[in-house]
Amino acid sequence: MKGSKSPALASLALIALTALAYAPAYHAAFIWDDSEYILDNKNLDSPAGLARIWLQPGATPQYYPLTFTTFWIEHHLWGANPAGYHIVNIALHAAAALALWRLLRKLRVPGAYLAAALFALHPITVESVAWISERKNVLSTLLALLAVDAALTWFAMKHAQFAPTDTPLVELRRSPFGAREHLFIALLAYAAALLAKTAVCTLPVVLLILIWWRTGRLHPRDVRDFAPFFVLSLVAVITIYMETRHIGAAGADFAFSPIDRLLIASRAICFYAAKLAWPFPLVFIYPRWAINPASSAQWLYPITVTAALAALFLARRQLGRGPLAAALIYIILLTPTLGFININFMLFSFVADHFAYLPAIPLLPLAAAGITLLLRDQRRVVLPVATALCAFLVFLTFRHARLYQSPEKLWTHTLSNNPHSPVAHAALGFALQQRGAADESIAQYDAALQQTPLDPSALYNLANIAAARPNRASNVLAIYAAAANLDPKNPHVPYLTGLLLTATNHSDEAITNYERAIALEPNFAAAYSNLGGALMHKDRYPEAAQALDRAIQLQPDLFEAQLQLAVALTKLGRNAEALNHYRAAAALNPTHAEAQSLLREAESRNSVRPHSSNK
């Protein structure tokens, strides 16, 4: 299955197979954080939002401006229709497979076409392709492959004299570009890959391993030559900062010792290799295993990884440098997601299929080369074997991609393999809530809140159910009480309990819960705002004004706090101060009839010229 006699026909066949395998994904839905990335992302609405995407880290969940730019463009093309986003993801995945084939051919890897087909069709890639938010994966991988292709070509053209004549670094073909142009293309593609997803930041190390594999040597000058690539990799610092400061990958939940992190990393390395060889089952969120350095069984993972690398090193004369190079590249590409750096997803699981998308690339060509070399004396068998393998993978990928057609289907499948996942229970609860199955959704939220860390979406969605269906309030309050016992330091539990008690006219108990939330989180602006409202309901205006003033200090754009503070100050006879807050409230919400009316009354009391809130 060489695919080289007719490259155009072989390319079309690979595209067709990819399109067939992912046919269910054309009708897939938005899932999980697709809402944050696309549906609720106000940055996609205007040119100003596009500027924020590029110039303001923190305006998006992660600083991946190129990925969000593609979403910005598509938002203006097909809006909230998920089909367009899915088609682009599948097209990028097919393009990445073609780019991999081209690179492997230039590197003269046996079975290059089969390797590209394995990558295109392996079901472990489904999570990255069928989940719109993982555009960052497919886009950055395509760009990374183009960068490696151009970088190796540049290096070969510049240092041809250093490569042994019997083992050229890459197969140099006719090109309109010289060495400098290839270097520029490589740097541009790598910078773009980093702006799509910074997990490709280990690519310069991969380039050095590839040079060692092909030439059998590595000089200090080679490292110096790739210095610009290492400098570009420093953009990953932004991602680390965003994960810890903006997304919240810090604190007690991430307090792992170096030994813990070693055990996490080595087990993950073994996990992904096993899933590539035997992809059963594939789960959207895998169970998060417990770390126990005292367990001798857990030390089998670092021992296995070390032994495998040592065996490949000792056998490099018999097997060649290729298997060792592939193993090293696999580990290097996995490094950003192995737990040495905190990432928020570690709250749910230490592994995920989308983490293996790019790292799978070195192992799949190794497998394809092994199949090709084993059957080299039986050429008539190669094509049927490769065809049967690809057909099987198409079936698996097609079947797995169908899960993404419905959030209910995806999360139900997840819970069948990971029944204690709080985020899966919460997400299924939300899907059920959206179709009006209140009782079923409450049961899922309850299951989510029986474990720590408490799922914040479950907490807030329960409040929405109680607000829409007051007869469910007692059920929700009971769940909140259990959650408070399970996680007594979580400020959102008493805050939401206070909201529900306010809605059911239990002001005194609501005040107690708001105060508890503030004691746990002193900068909780919404808690101060609602505390002020509850105090006003009890005619405790001096205390209410103090709480509302603190809310505005923390968050000046809180409309309700501005308006309620104005009313409280009016009750206290502090009309001049109240006027300023009426104006602020009216400016924050110019269409709010009551705010505009109260502003006019305040201006009349203070005998001043009417002030336009629209200026």
Image: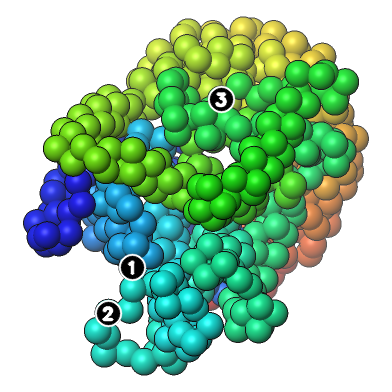
Mark sitting earlier along the chain (2/1) = 1
Identify the residue at horizontal 30%, vertical 49% (top origin): 111
- Secondary structure of residue under mark 3: loop
Looking at the rendering, which quadrant does residue 271 occupy? top right
- Where disc 1 sits, the SS reads helix
Mark 3 and mark 2 lie on one chain; the one further toward the N terminus is: 2
Q: Residue at x 22, y 32 (%)?
A: 385
103 left or right, relative to 32: left
Q: Secondary structure at mark 2?
A: loop
Tell me whether the residue at label 1 lies in contact with that at label 3, contact meaning CB atoms closer than 8 angstroms: no
**In the picture shown, does residue 280 fall above or below 610?**
above
Left of 174 or right of it: where is 599? right
Above or below 387: residue 185: below
Where is residue 473? Give x, y as percent. Answer: 60, 12
Q: Position of residue 405 (x, y in %)?
A: 29, 29
Q: Which mark is residue 286?
A: 3
